[in-house]
Image (cartoon, rainbow, N blue to C red):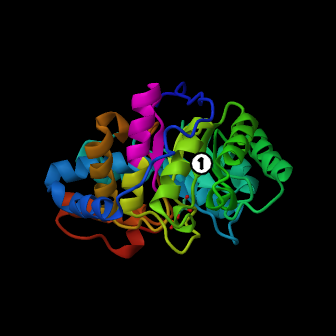
Amino acid sequence: MSNLRRNPGTPFSTDAFEGLRINTPAVERRAATIPTRRSLKKEWQAAWLCNAVRCIDLTTLAGDDTEARVARLCAKARQPIAPDIAEALGVTGLTTGAVCVYPTMVRAAVRALGNSGIRVASVATGFPAGLMPLPLRLAEIRYAVDEGASEIDIVISRGLALRGEWAALYDEICAMREACGPARMKAILATGELKTFDNVARASHVAMQAGADWIKTSTGKEAANATLPVSLVMLRCIRDFAAGTGIKVGFKPAGGLRTAKDALNWQVLMREELGPDWLRPDLFRIGASSLLGDIERQLHHHVTGRYAATHRLAIA
Ligand SMILES: O=C[C@H](O)COP(=O)(O)O
């Protein structure tokens, strides 16, 4: 995975989204075709599922998180599928892309992951609501980076987006990007709270202009999480931003992704909208706390012809 790719950002400009009007029925029609576009069978399906594992931000963001739970999660990130299944698939060295935790759990994750190369992502900026004074949100980013996080998942101020205060939103995200220092930044738009696709598109552009390395749909705590239509809107913005600036920004759907079929659908969407470059972990992450179990189940079925007993799939 490249450590070098960063989005340097661009000056703030409303040109990219001023006259923008998203055609909602067209977005919904196109998104509805995604699950039907490719029939991924047998070896192909197994390969795509292994790629999904590589791109997972294996997540625990619960009020009762403990260092012991984070250590178990990290063990799962290091060995996401059972060794016998990995061997039968001819896959070696498979890990998840990152683990994603609260700031106070970063140190435990760094310790548990050692020199595995798996990145530690931390949410910050008053996740999930972001309703804290800006200096405190920036201090939280710095704390997580000091603890060892190499990726920071910030939440945007939904109020600024809902009021159309795009320049103020840009300034805030720029300050967050600066506070991240060397850590790469994912900007969570919380699309379920932005009301319209037009707002989702505008917030996507503003976050990319402000230097987000990935744009991310949801915290997993909103009433509406990642959907294919909202993802399609964000991917079209990523495509336009890349066309206009030459800068490739990554995408992270998150929240409510639980099934192997979800993992396949989102990869098909990425492939169709942005091409194969965007199927690598430096440009694509799937944020999920309970997706890996079903992927493992499907891989087990692929190898053995039967589904594994639940106790074999103890976590995630
Ligand atoms: O960033 C990741 C999300 O919090 C995960 O949401 P989830 O628990 O619905 O998978």
Q: Residue at x 34, y 58 (%)?
A: 23
Q: What is the magenta range?
A: 235-253
Can residue 280 be seen here? The reply is: no
Q: Residue at x 45, y 55 (%)?
A: 253
Label 1: few (<14), some or many (≥20) within 10 Å? many
- Looking at the rendered structure, the kind of residue marked 1 is Ala
Q: Residue at x 72, y 60 (%)?
A: 130
Q: Residue at x 39, y 50 (%)?
A: 53
Q: Is residue 214 magenta?
A: no
- Where's residue 3, x and y in %? 54, 28
Q: Is residue 249 magenta?
A: yes
Q: Residue furthest front?
A: 19
Apparent side of residue 4 relative to residue 153 in the rendered image (left or right): left
- Where's residue 2, x and y in %? 48, 27
- Where's residue 28, x and y in %? 30, 64
Q: Work out whether 10 lies above or below 278.
A: above
- Residue linked to disc 1: 187
Can residue 29 be seen here? The reply is: yes
Apparent side of residue 264 relative to residue 255 in the rendered image (left or right): left
